[in-house]
Every structure is written in C-alpha cells, then in structure tokens.
Image (spheres, rainbow, N blue to C red):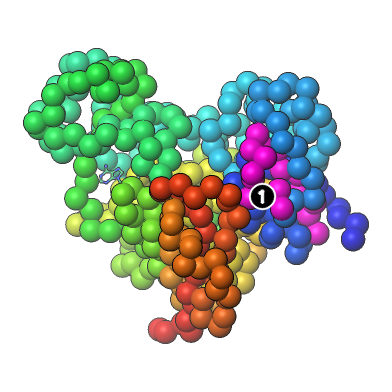
Amino acid sequence: MNKNISVGILGGGQLGMMLCQASSNINIKTHIYCPDSDSPAQLYSDDFTCMDYLNEKEIIKFSNSVDIITYEFENIPKETLELIDSKKLRPGIKSLEQTQDRLTERKLLQKLDIPFAPYIELRNEEDFKYSISNFGESIIKTRRFGYDGKGQISINEKTKLNKDISALFNEAIIEKRIPFEFEFSQVSCRDIHGNISNFPLTRNIHENHILKHSYAPLKLNNDLGIYAKEITKKILSDLEHIGVLTVEFFKTKENIIVNEIAPRVHNSGHWSIEGCSDSQFQIHMQAVSGIKIKKPELLYECHMENLIGNEINEWINKKSDDEVNIHLYNKKEVKNGRKMGHVTYIKDITE
Ligand code: ADP
Ligand code: MG
C-alpha cells in the first residue's frame, strides 16, 4: 500500500506501539526512534531506528526522513529537540516546555486561572519548614522526569529534613496532599484547524501511585463536566497544541482541580480503542498529520485494567473475546511496577 504521509515517533514504549497499530489502519507510515532494542513499538512500526536521543547524526537523519515528528513521552532531552526541524514537531515545542517541568506547568495553570493544589518550590530548608507548618501532609515531587509516582516522597508534620529531601533542593516542588473524592481525566485532541474533540471523561483509580483501573464514561455532575472541558480547551488553545493532550483532575468536595497535564496520548484513554468510534491513538495520528478530526462516539461502557509486573502471567495464554480485550506489550523483562499490558472489559451502554 502506498502510504501518503510518514510520521516519526520519539519513544518506543506501549504508547508508541498503539500509535503504530492505529496508523496502519489509516494509511499513515510510522518510524519509531528510541534507544531501546527491546521496544514494544518496533514490532508494529514501518521503520525503526534504535539509537540514543543524543546521537546528533541519527536524529538529523531521522528528522529528514519523515514528514512530521511526534512523541509518546514528554521527557525528550532539550538537545534532541534543538536538532529536529521545529516546523515538523507536533505537538509543538511550547507544549513540551510548559509541561515537562511541574513548576512551569503550575505557572501555566496560574496564568490561565485554573485551580490546582497549593504548592511551594523546594529550594531550601525554609521552604521545607514552610510546607510542614502550612500544608501538613504533602508530597514532594521532582520537577522533571517523574512518572508512575517515581520521584515522589510523602511527608507530614513529623518528617525531619533528611539527605534524600535536601538532595532535591531546586529540583522539586512540595504539594499539599489533597483529600480528593476521586480522580478523573479528560483526553482531548486539537487539530491544525483549531477543532477540538473531547473523549468522554474517565474515572481513574491508582494503586501505589500507578494507574490501575479506568472506568468510562464517568458521569460527573453536568456543570463540573462542562468546566473540565473548558479547562482542557483553555490549555489546548494557549499551547496551540496539535494532537492529543490529557488533563488529570482531582474531584474535591465542592470543585475540581488539575493535578497534571500530559501533552500526549494517555494510559487513561486506552479504553477508547474498543470503547469509541475513533481511538485516542487514531485521532492523535490524524491530527498531527494535518487531517481534520472527528468527534469520537461512545460505543461501549468500558473498564480498563493495567497488568502490572507479574499480573501479566495470568493473561499471556488467554484470548480476547466479546467481553474482554487483551493487549500485551511484549516487554521481555517483567519488573515490579512495570506496565506489561492492559485489558479492557466492554459492555453495552446503559443510560
Ligand atoms: P505522575 O503521574 O507523573 O507519577 P502525579 O502527580 O500524577 O505524578 O501523581 C501520581 C498519583 O499520586 C496521582 O494520580 C494521585 O493518585 C497521587 N497524588 C499526586 N499528587 C497528589 C496530591 N497532591 N494529593 C493527593 N494525591 C496525590
Ligand atoms: Mg499523573
């Protein structure tokens, strides 16, 4: 088949894998670039470059060989971004710069008048003491490179300053722990024409700071549901974002507040592969390729469960059927806390 557009993807994990799977149905050619020879995405991509992100020659070659470059993770080194043609990068540099660092992310939210948890920069002992006396139970989060709860330390009034904490001076924020009712997310997409498509809201349950279950659609009080979409639209528009972007929220007693922005497809949107007319992966690839996006229609009620570490063993020899869809990521090494696959249970929509 003669594919009409080629999209390079930085990163070769399961998100990259599912972006490639979606592309093969819509005539988009994919080229994965990542340093990991055991990458789940390479099995489904048309081309694969296995190289370090800092290999200048290979990054330039990669950039020249594709029409568009997108990414499946936000922690792409600055040096890499400087080597690639910025006109080809979708979502653009602004989306990455504003969300790679939790501090700039919070400044963006503040600028847009979007609520988030009280926080303070952790620069020195005074900041630490301030948080202890003003926030009580809190979470220290590294500004960069955190995912699946990595780089987080829980603290409370009794915590004493220690080496692990002082090692994070100037590299972390301290955030008040929010006694939320539940967590949910909004996965949305913006195309080059500025059209925005929203997926239904998803309720998320984390275990040990890692997403374990997603339930969709979440039926949130109507005003709050509209508010979540307004917040997401404000962020998408301000960033002039192209592609999928996900906003993680906490539902508090009276309101909703933003926890985190991911400038990409998201684990809480995996259910859309079966649950919607167009999946988050398909819509992302269409948007970055310059294709006008549609509104995804809900087909099923879904429950997505992540298979973490050894949990994969139970599913390796099972087959998908009418009720459960099994997605294995083909990662060779099983590690504690590692996302090895997911399953999505579907059922007919009840009003
Ligand atoms: P990441 O997903 O990048 O690891 P998050 O900031 O989303 O980091 O934190 C992971 C999870 O930890 C959240 O989904 C939530 O369950 C919990 N968490 C994070 N911040 C807070 C907070 N301020 N109050 C309560 N729980 C939190
Ligand atoms: Mg998160």
Q: Relative to residue 241, is residue 301 drawn left or right?
A: left
Nearest the viewer among 168 and 7 is: 168
Q: Relative to residue 142, is residue 200 drawn left or right?
A: right
Secondary structure under badge 1?
Answer: helix
* Rendering quadrant holding ligand 1: top left
Looking at the image, can residue 296 be seen? Answer: no
Q: Quadrant of the C terminus?
A: bottom left
Q: Is residue 278 magenta?
A: no
Q: Residue at x 33, y 48 (%)?
A: 209
Residue behind mark 1: 41
Q: Position of residue 342 (x, y in %)?
A: 50, 62
Q: Is residue 38 magenta?
A: yes
Q: Position of residue 233 (x, y in %)?
A: 49, 50
Instruction: Note whether 272 is above or below 319 in the view shown.
Output: above
- Which portion, as a residue range, is magenta? 27-43
Q: Quadrant of the N terminus?
A: bottom right
Looking at the image, can residue 64 be seen? Answer: yes
Instruction: Note whether 199 is above or below 321 in the view shown.
Output: above
Q: Position of residue 104 (x, y in %)?
A: 42, 29
Q: Residue at x 53, y 43 (%)?
A: 263
Q: Residue at x 60, y 63 (%)?
A: 279
